[in-house]
Image (spheres, rainbow, N blue to C red):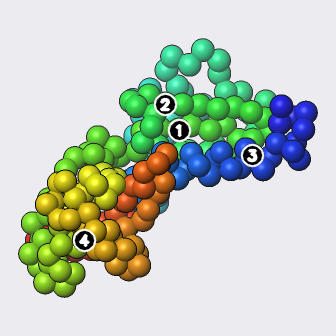
Amino acid sequence: MLHAEPEARLAKLTDELETYWEVVLAPYWARIGPVLEADILHRARTVAEHGAGRLLDDLHPSLSWESDGLRMARRKHPLVRATAGAGLLLIPSVFTGPDLRTRTTPPDPPQIAYPARGTGTLWQRRRTAGAEALAAVLGRSRTLLLAELESPASTTQLAHRTGLSPAGVSQQLTALRDAGLVSAHRAGRSVLYARTTAAETLLRAASP
């Protein structure tokens, strides 16, 4: 349909993509983003200290760098440089599971999506040992709400978990949102609140 009517359909497609981002990814990006950034920094340091061969050898058990090229176990069709685009695009991901994902669509470069380091700990509950120190700055209610936002939650859910009134939760969330510490994302009839990267950094800094 998009190919047949690109101008008419493009706006709807972009709206759908924006909705997908808001509902599926944005509420969790404060957790996902730092994992991907840390992986990229680690890979860049590996290249700088040991070269690209070490990077490719360490990327995934099914990959190996040999003198005549990059080998991928269990891949049915080889990546032939004559038909693939120039270069190689490496994509860290938290959605691949334990496997690699590949894409070859000339003239684009071959792409390999691989599991980022730290993905296994992405959803572990984090320590909030510094809550008392942070409460002295933000206030007890706001600190409590930030600690509860391990995963996105609605005002009603947060009120139930914390014992605060829904009106009180809403007031504190508004203040946290104005300060850039939480973000709001609509999911159907609900609005889910999530910690931002700034809030994650603040909680880590307050922990001993």
Mark in the foreground, 3 or 2: 3
Mark in the foreground, 4 or 3: 4
Q: Which residue is at a point 71% across and 27% down the rendered structure image?
A: 80
**Residue 134, placed above or below residue 13:** below
Image quadrant in which the C terminus is located: bottom left
CA distance separating discs 4 and 1: 44 Å
Q: Amino acid at mark 2?
A: Leu
Task: Say if mark 1 contacts mark 2, CB within 8 Å.
Answer: yes
Image quadrant in which the N terminus is located: top right
User: As drawn, is 180 to the left or to the right of 53?
Assistant: left
In the picture, the disc for residue 100 is: 2
**Residue 159, placed above or below residue 55:** below
SS of the residue at dot 1? strand
CA distance separating discs 4 and 3: 38 Å
**Residue 2, placed above or below residue 165:** above
Q: Amino acid at mark 1?
A: Ala
Which label's residue is closer to the chain start, 4 or 2? 2
Residue holding disc 3: 12
Residue 15, x across and y down, in percent = 68, 50
Which label's residue is closer to the chain start, 1 or 3? 3
CA distance separating discs 1 and 3: 28 Å
Sort mark 3 into few (<14), some (14-19) or many (20+) by Cα contacts within 10 Å: few
Residue holding disc 4: 168
Which label's residue is closer to the chain start, 1 or 2? 2
Residue 77, x across and y down, in percent = 65, 17
Q: Amino acid at mark 4?
A: Gly
